[in-house]
Amino acid sequence: MLALVTGASSGIGYEISKYLSQFGYDIIAVGQNIERLNFLKLECKTNVIIERVDLSNIENCINLCEKYENKDISILVNCAGIGAIGWFDQLSLNQELNLINVNIIATHILTKFFIDTMLKNNKGTILNVASSAAFAPGPLMATYYATKSYVFKLSTSISKELKKKKSKVNVSVLCPGPVKTEFNKRLNIDYSVKPTTPEYVAKYSIKKLLKGKKVIIPGFKNKLGVIASKVLPDVILEEYIYNMQSKKIK
Ligand SMILES: NC(=O)c1ccc[n+]([C@@H]2O[C@H](COP(=O)([O-])OP(=O)(O)OC[C@H]3O[C@@H](n4cnc5c(N)ncnc54)[C@H](OP(=O)(O)O)[C@@H]3O)[C@@H](O)[C@H]2O)c1
């Protein structure tokens, strides 16, 4: 059994890789930080193939897919992701394009390539990592929230198509709330609420994924937050999220 995990060098992707390894999966661990990927390799009992790839580059994504598309990957986890916080007009275009490339384009390309092989074999499962941010407007994190909304809608729509085709291939989407990883450190911001652990998110999501759950929302408070995002009008959510994010900007 073989799983390809992006974002395997840190946080949720790192813990998902470790957990899948405990289930007996060999891991193709994709990331940029070789030291962390080597550490993951030491922590796993199964075989770990390290792939140092900058997923913000389209050509790199396609090369990665071409290398592994016929390798009978049972699980693809698109977990690599980055954020950006600040006023839309003040964030640099390059930073935002980089974010869109990692969060959307890389996820889209990998999903597209691997679903093709999975459909031919009529087996396999894909876990795309979105966020509870997918359900709400995100002033001061506008681009990040929009990318997660894209990942959510793409994944649930493909999942419906697969059901209509009566395919055994599965696409699920993971929507965590705040998780204590490198994510906020990279942005130099604090959490607005107590974050959950990446270990919990990884175990919960893989258990649900293997049961075929389509939308995976870890944590009780996070589930309540998602329900609130669905029932409250956007004008209220926009104001609430603006206030929450503005407190994080130092
Ligand atoms: N933490 C949260 O509160 C939270 C909440 C909801 C959703 N999420 C989502 O969860 C996913 C994982 O994030 P995390 O919280 O685990 O954060 P993290 O610890 O910062 O991990 C992010 C991962 O993405 C990889 N990555 C970033 N840019 C990359 C690039 N250009 N090429 C290849 N890999 C790249 C990083 O690899 P390198 O370090 O090796 O570059 C790292 O492995 C993201 O999609 C994030 O949006 C996180």
Image: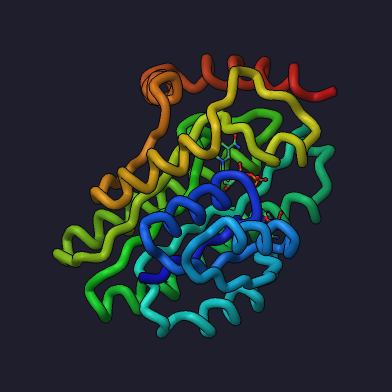
Image location (x, y in percent) of residue 55:
65, 65
User: Quadrant location of residue 239?
Assistant: top right
| Residue 59 image-quadrant placement | bottom right
Lateral position of residue 2 relative to residue 130, left or right: left
- Residue at the spot 45% in from the left edge and 24% down from the top edge: 222
Viewer-closest of 201 and 143? 201
What residue lies at 76% left-to-right and 36% top-to-bottom? 185
Where residue 142 appears, as percent x and y from the top left, is 65, 37
In-front residue for pair 200/120: 200
Q: If the image is split into quadrants, where does the N terminus sit?
A: bottom left
In this view, 8 is above or below 73: above
Residue 110 seen anywhere in this rendered image of the structure: no
Q: Residue at x 46, y 33 (%)?
A: 135
Percent x, y of residue 40: 61, 58
Colour convention of the picture? rainbow
Q: In the image, is residue 153 above or below residue 74?
A: above
Horizontally, residue 161 falls left or right of residue 21, namely left
Give the number of marks: 0
Question: Left or right: 19 with respect to 243?
Answer: left
Q: Is residue 61 left or right of residue 94?
A: left
Kindly tell me whether residue 102 is visible in this rendering. Answer: yes
Q: Closest to the observer: 168 or 101?
A: 168
Residue at image location 62% in from the left, 71% down from the top:
50
Work out which quarter of the rendered image holds the C terminus and state it. top right
Q: Position of residue 215 (x, y in %)?
A: 33, 42
